[in-house]
Amino acid sequence: MTVFVIRRLLQSIGVLFATSIIVFLGVYAIGNPVDILIAADATQAERQAAIVALGLDRSLPEQYWIFLTNALQGDFGRSFVFSQPAISLIFARLPATLELAFVALVIALVIGIPLGLIAGLKPRSVTDETIMTGSILGFSLPNFWQGMMLIMIFSVWLGWLPASGRGVVGEVLGVRTSLATWDGIAHLILPALNLALFQLALVIRLTRTGVRETMPLDFVKFARAKGLSERRIVLVHVLKNIMIPVVTVVGMEFGSLIAFAVVTETIFAWPGIGKLLIDSIMVLDRPVVVSYLLVVVTMFIVLNLVVDILYSVLDPRIRLRDAQ
């Protein structure tokens, strides 16, 4: 297990370093933030002073070296717009995004796994066809359209839920969260549901496929021969067997929820890092954009590492094969 974890850590460090180069070149080589941040009637001397103050007068390799050395010390630069450390802006908005992604993931799991089990246990039935049709809609309909329809139905027509913002935030064990107040929960429901729809469809189809593949296997037949109830066979033997791919995909999808919450946060004006990214791109606030991308990539790497470890715990053949 130790060799397995060390190897994964080294791979993660290599991926993070390569990503930093790609992100830096992609963001810093495109556009000129001075054209947006400085007034159109500014003199050449004022423009040059701004370029020097932002460090844009140096060559690209020099800018990257300065960025890398500072990043290793936890300094990702200062926001061109807010004049604050970019990483502090990200961390200030990150709890709202994590909260949104966590609730969306819970919705996908709590609804998706039971529906997938039902569909898998009753193949080609009316129930199965209905559930699978719903999952196809979850895959097919654009996320932004789903969000607008949710606002139209539940906020405009029915007036049940608010359409934007985070609402009143309370504290639970010292952590500020929307889940601590009814107003916060009301504001959280629609964006979390919108973000969860794709993952919900994915969990349903993944669970159904796992059940269909597992039910004909010999160990299930043996469990029936021992006289175990169908409920115990499904909840203990079948569910445990299909949790390996579910854990893998769900771990990856949590990172996707964070990374792709941009659309949902923009539609519902949710004050997370996704909305901050859009606002920063509009004004070419490079340090904030780079900080966002590297934080998200780091979270993906950490989640991948955790998923790999959990996968090896659930299936020892993985770590044994990796150790060879």
Image: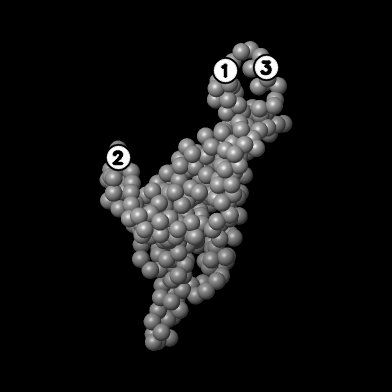
Residues at circles 1 and 2 in contact by the CB criterion of under 8 Å: no
Q: Is residue 23 left or right of residue 55?
A: right
Q: Which residue is mark 3?
A: 222
Identity of the amino acid at label 2? Val
Is residue 90 visible in the rendered image? The answer is no
Q: Residues within 10 Å of mark 1 (few under 14, many from 20)?
A: few
- Amino acid type indicated by mark 1: Ser
Between the C-alphas of marks 3 and 2, the distance is: 47 Å
Q: Position of residue 4 (x, y in %)?
A: 62, 34
Q: Is there any visible trace of residue 127 in the rendered image?
A: yes
Pointer 1 with pointer 3, Cβ within 8 A: no
Determine which quarter of the picture holds residue 309.
top right
Give the image's coloring scheme.
Answer: one colour
- Where in the figure is residue 187, as x and y percent of width and height? 34, 51
Q: Nearer the viewer, residue 238 or 317?
A: 238
Disc 2 on helix, strand or loop? strand
Seen at 49% across and 39% down, the residue is 111
Q: Residue 38 got which mark?
A: none
Mark-to-mark CA distance, 1 and 3:
12 Å
Can you say whether 117 is above or below 18 in the image? above
Residue type indicated by callout 3: Phe
Q: Quadrant of the C terminus?
A: top right
Is 137 in front, or is 308? Answer: 137
Q: Earlier in the sequence, mark 3 or mark 2?
A: 2
Q: Nearer the viewer, residue 249 or 276?
A: 249
Q: Could you tell me which secondary element the residue under label 1 belongs to? A: loop
The residue where tag 1 is placed is: 229
Label 2 CA crowd tier, 10 Å (few <14, some 14–19, many 20+)? few
Q: Secondary structure at mark 3?
A: helix
Q: Which residue matches tag 2? A: 172
Q: Using the image, determine if residue 301 lies above or below residue 31.
A: above
Residue in front for this viewpoint, 172 or 119: 119
